[in-house]
Image (tube, helix red, strand yellow):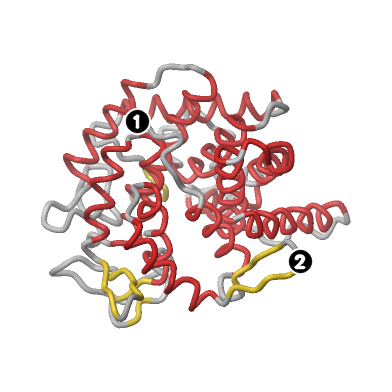
Amino acid sequence: MRGLAEELVAFEDADDHLRAGGAGGEITGMWGLLAHQMTALGLAQVCLAHPEWRERFAPIATRAAAKSLRPEMRDVFTATWNGEDGLAVPDSPHGHAYLSYPALALGMARLVDPAFPPDLAAQDDALVASYERRLLASPTALLETFPGEAYPTDVAAVAAAIAVHGRATGVDHTAVLAHWAQQVRAVQIDRATGLLLQRMGVDAHSHDAPRASGTGLGAYFAGFANRALAEELATGLFHQERNILGFSAIHEYGKGSDGTGDIDSGPVILGISVSATGFALAPARAFGHRDIFTRLFRTTDLAGLPLRSGNRLRFANGGVIGNALLLAFLTSGPELAP
């Protein structure tokens, strides 16, 4: 994955160049947050798997993680909370679970970058401390992303950020991670399908069907915090696999549910989710499901249109976000899971 990593380095360099010229970044808002976060995660995972590349990629992981904290990356979330910026109000009674994405990016960069800046370390400490308090105070281990809406996938990212912080700092987060895992099993997984419920209230009432896109990304995040739980989610996810002539994809909705998809699933075509298919690569790789991974990657490779240029590889159909996600998922592994 060296070529894909170099492609994301080029993206971060171009983004820095635009910012230095006063033009703003290449991509902002929710998509910018995801692109920089996943770039940081993917590059950090590359460093863990290939320590000899750490000098090259660790500083860029830190740069990407820092940019995921920029105000323009979370404006859409701040607006939904009537202007309350979750980063500026660490003791807010609101969940602000979306900040788990930059928090996890910070933790991973901190883990691999010997020159990780003290100010970013302090920000990581503050975010994790706030999330630990909120999770322990929530009987269902659910935190809102938007007012009245909690996403188990985002809360899995909260748990991942807490777990990685523990490994980077030596702080013991056992109690909060045990509480989270217990409540995921108790109220956040649909018993009939094994899939995560996509959207919920903090009272554990479901606002949406059990779906594969949330389960796939949730399994990736859960892998940082609780390997056994992540494998349970992966098992439910792989029941959604549809295989034709050695190419496979993931059906979005569990049995008894249906829908047209949304921003989380991407286009749903004949029940198949583009996003869930890509997300499933991570647990397939992390848990050694070579056959499933191969079938999924055949589909990804065919639909993604890979292009090489020098030492760089990109998938033309994925854009920056698709490439960042694939770097994270294709380098996902057991190195961090307890």
Mark 2 is on which residue type? Gly
* Residue 251 circle label: none
**What residue is rendered at 40% in x and 44% in y?**
221
Q: Where is residue 205 in the image (x, y as percent from the top left)?
A: 19, 50
Residue 153, position as x, y percentages in the image: 36, 49
Judge depth for marks 1 and 2 and give the one in front: 2
User: Residue type at mark 1?
Assistant: Leu
For this orientation, the residue located farthest to the top is 171
Residue 149 sits above or below residue 91 on the image: below
Q: Tell me the CA gap for discs 1 and 2.
A: 46 Å
Which SS class for mark 1?
helix
Q: Residues within 10 Å of mark 2 (few under 14, many from 20)?
A: few
Q: Residue 285 at x, y = what percent?
A: 40, 52
Residue lying at the far right in this picture: please name it.
Answer: 21
Q: In this rendering, does residue 150 appear at all?
A: no
Observer-nearest of 23 and 192: 192
Q: Earlier in the sequence, mark 1 or mark 2?
A: 1
258 or 79, which is in the foreground? 258
Tell whether label 2 touches label 1 (CB within 8 Å): no
**Is 275 positioned to the left or the right of 199 in the image?**
right
Q: Residue at x 26, y 28 (%)?
A: 179
Say which residue appears at 58% left-offset and 57% top-offset: 324
Q: In the image, residue 68 lies at what x, y percent?
A: 62, 46
| Vertical side of 88 occupied by 148: above or below | below
| Vertical arrangement, residue 149 with respect to residue 258, above or below | above
Residue 135: mark in rendering: 1
Identify whether 113 is placed above or below 77: above
Badge 1, how many Cα within 10 Å: few under 14, some, many 20+? many
Which residue corresponds to mark 2?
310
